[in-house]
Image (cartoon, grey):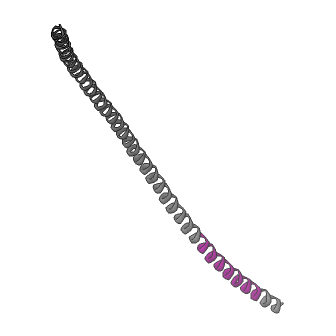
Amino acid sequence: TLSSAAALKDTTMQTEIGNYEERMATLESTFFQNFATTNNDLHSRLDQLNMDAMMSLANSTNHWWGRVEELSTKNAEMFVHHTMAEESLQKELISLSAASALKETTLNTEIGNYEERMASLESSFFQNFATTNNDLHSRLDQL
């Protein structure tokens, strides 16, 4: 009876150990299946996030390249506009400078001509005055 109690206890323990091993195998199998599923889901999500990040980077890069191209075009247009405006102002300045130099030359020539005519008139006046004065004195002397 002692041996039958020991045998019963041994059988019970063997059954529990068997159940334990079976449950552990089931738990391990379930754990690794869940782990594999979770790991696959995680990798799938990471792949999706990487794909989304690359798409976002590509979109942002394309947008910024578009903006850089737009700004470059506007900068070139402004450069051309300012260059043309500067060229126009330079032409106007040259034209005004040339007109001013021509006017100055014309005025200097007129002043020179005026001074020559005044000198000629003064000389002629004094010659006529002297002649008239001599004639007058000569007539006065004759009288």
Q: Residue at x 43, y 53 (%)?
A: 87
The reply, left or right, for residue 132 in relation to residue 84 is: right
Residue 139, horizontal then vertical, whole percent: 79, 88
Residue that sits furthest to the front in the current view = 1
When asked about the image quadrant of residue 114, the answer is bottom right
When asked about the image quadrant of residue 74, the answer is top left
Q: Which residue is drawn at 20% across and 11% down?
A: 9
Magenta-span inclusion, residue 83: no
Name the foreground residue: 96 vs 129: 96
The reply, left or right, for residue 74 in relation to residue 132 is: left
Name the foreground residue: 93 vs 75: 75
Quarter holding the C terminus? bottom right
Residue 20, horizontal then vertical, whole percent: 21, 15
Residue 98, horizontal then vertical, whole percent: 49, 62
When asked about the image quadrant of residue 131, the answer is bottom right
Magenta-span inclusion, residue 132: yes
Which SS type dominates the magenta stretch?
A: helix
The reply, left or right, for residue 95 in relation to residue 21 is: right
Image: magenta residue range: 110-135
Q: In this view, does 21 lie above or below 73?
A: above
Name the foreground residue: 126 vs 50: 50
Q: Is residue 143 above or below residue 40?
A: below
